[in-house]
Amino acid sequence: MSSFRVEGGHQLNGEIIPQGAKNEALQIISAVLLTDQEVVIHKIPQIRDVLKLIDLLEDMGVEVSKNGGESCTFKAANVNLDFLNTEDFKDKASALRGSIMILGPLLSRFGTGRMPKPGGDKIGRRRLDTHFVGFQKLGAKFNYDSKTSFYTVDGTNLKGAYMLLDEASVTGTANIIMAAVMAEGLTTIYNAACEPYIQQLCKMLIRMGANIEGVGSNLLRIEGVKSLNGTEHTLLPDMIEVGSFIGMAAMTKSSLIIKDARIEELGIIPETFMRLGIKMNFKDDDIHIPAQEHYEIDSYIDGSILTIADAIWPGLTPDLLSVILVTATQARGTALIHQKMFESRLFFVDKLIDMGAQIILCDPHRATVIGLDRAYPLRGITMTSPDIRAGVSLLIAAMSAEGVSTIHNIDQIDRGYQFIDDRLNALGAKIERVG
Ligand SMILES: CC(=O)N[C@H]1[C@@H](OP(=O)(O)OP(=O)(O)OC[C@H]2O[C@@H](n3ccc(=O)[nH]c3=O)[C@H](O)[C@@H]2O)O[C@H](CO)[C@@H](O)[C@@H]1O
Ligand SMILES: C=C(OP(=O)(O)O)C(=O)O
């Protein structure tokens, strides 16, 4: 288990380019299974989850060639479905959450698919009902074997259907779209997730020959086609990385330029950090966060305390609330952080409290942060990262703290942040990878 040894108190200065988006990559790479033709994908982030998914696809018989840079060509001409029955498949597919999205393409193209309970962060209940109810609506048979923990879906003649999703699940929507693109007739998905990554998936599928209307809305109409062609696709910059860098710059009093951020795809993210009092300049597609000694949390028009809560897109992504929470600890003012979707994502605040932050964990979903306005710096401590976004938040806290911190279990951070130590050290951070 590797750790980071972080010497706090160093300001960063310079430019950083966000990696390709982790959660888009997992959808897009799964979609290569939909065609026997070549699919070229650019800006693939070199992070654990994505590399594990690519490895899994290779084991299934997908040809993967690296084109140099961050681009790969995938060709799923000879998929070996027998691999799905091996122990190796069980181990590899259960190692990440995103692997669940190979199920829709497998069902669509081969009429069958199986998947062990997927991994991913233990951040609360993460049910998969929406995925399977959607497949069932298209005519697939679903089975869960509790002894082997395997989900199985079967159905060779999927038929388009109307469905109103019980929740706008992101991976669920992606999976159902991929199952529906080659089902016979019209599928209507209401209450679909509509964030930019889903839009990107739809745009790619349309380039492959799919017939999808309503992209960007929560009502998708998909008219099934017989087969899909190859295509070329470039991933968006990772919006969670962009948000993490904004919070990091503010906490460490750094002047940072986030290059090519695709600002128009970031939704409410920049605005949310601005409500914490963080100044930002936008030039072309770059975001400049100037070095700021102080930043002050906004209140509502009636003077009441600001609440920052997650919501389905175009609301705020839950994946940034941990970063926002840590950033608020050094602001002037108070904020209530309300993590509505997941029930175990705020427990990491006990580490921030140990570092000297003033936080009241009201219940598993809500924490009140009383900003210190830098009057008392955080202190370096030894801690363990419980999940990917808490991990990066602890890294930000450690970078801003007085003294040295050690963060264990940084595999969690590596799951979603590419060469993060090297990239930040190049800007002036002092992060050492140990073990
Ligand atoms: C690989 C991947 O892409 N992972 C992301 C994906 O996970 P994932 O697709 O697994 O998350 P879902 O969108 O299915 O749901 C997330 C959680 O929110 C709850 N929920 C969801 C919809 C809703 O209307 N109400 C509600 O309460 C669900 O019950 C679940 O507990 O989307 C999450 C929500 O943006 C992100 O945190 C994950 O990083
Ligand atoms: C929770 C996340 O990822 P996953 O769904 O892969 O666990 C995340 O990216 O913040």
Image (cartoon, rainbow, N blue to C red):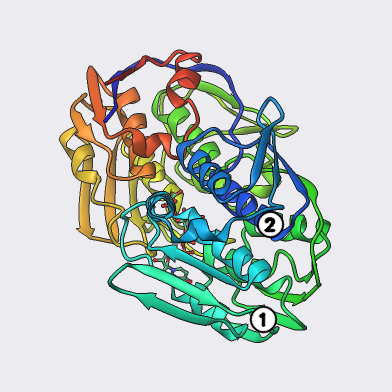
- Element type at mark 2: helix
Q: Residue shown at 48%/59% (left/top)?
A: 84
Q: Residue shown at 56%/60% (left/top)?
A: 81
Q: Spatial distance from mark 2 to mark 1, Cα to Cα? A: 20 Å
Q: Quadrant of residue 384?
A: top left
Q: Residue shown at 42%/71% (left/top)?
A: 151
Closer-to-camera residue (78/109) = 78
Residue 374 position within the rendered picture, expressed as x and y whole percent measured from the top left: 30, 28
Q: Amino acid at mark 1?
A: Leu
Residue 192 position within the rendered picture, expressed as x and y whole percent measured from the top left: 61, 72
Horizontal side of 88 relative to 409 (left or right) equals right
Dots 2 and 1: beta carbons under 8 Å? no
Q: Is residue 198 above or below residue 237?
A: below
- Name the residue tied to disc 2: 201
Asked if disc 2 is less than 8 Å from ligand 1, the answer is: no
Q: Amino acid at mark 2?
A: Leu
Closer-to-camera residue (242/360) = 242
Closer-to-camera residue (96/145) = 145
- Name the residue tied to disc 1: 158
Q: Quadrant of residue 392?
A: top left
Looking at the image, the residue that sits furthest to the left is 354
For marks 2 and 1 on the same chain, the one whose residue lies earlier in the sequence = 1
Q: Which quadrant of the rendered structure holds the C terminus?
A: top left
Question: How would you rate the neighbour count of disc 1 (Cα within 10 Å): few for under 14, some for 14-19, many for 20 or more?
Answer: many
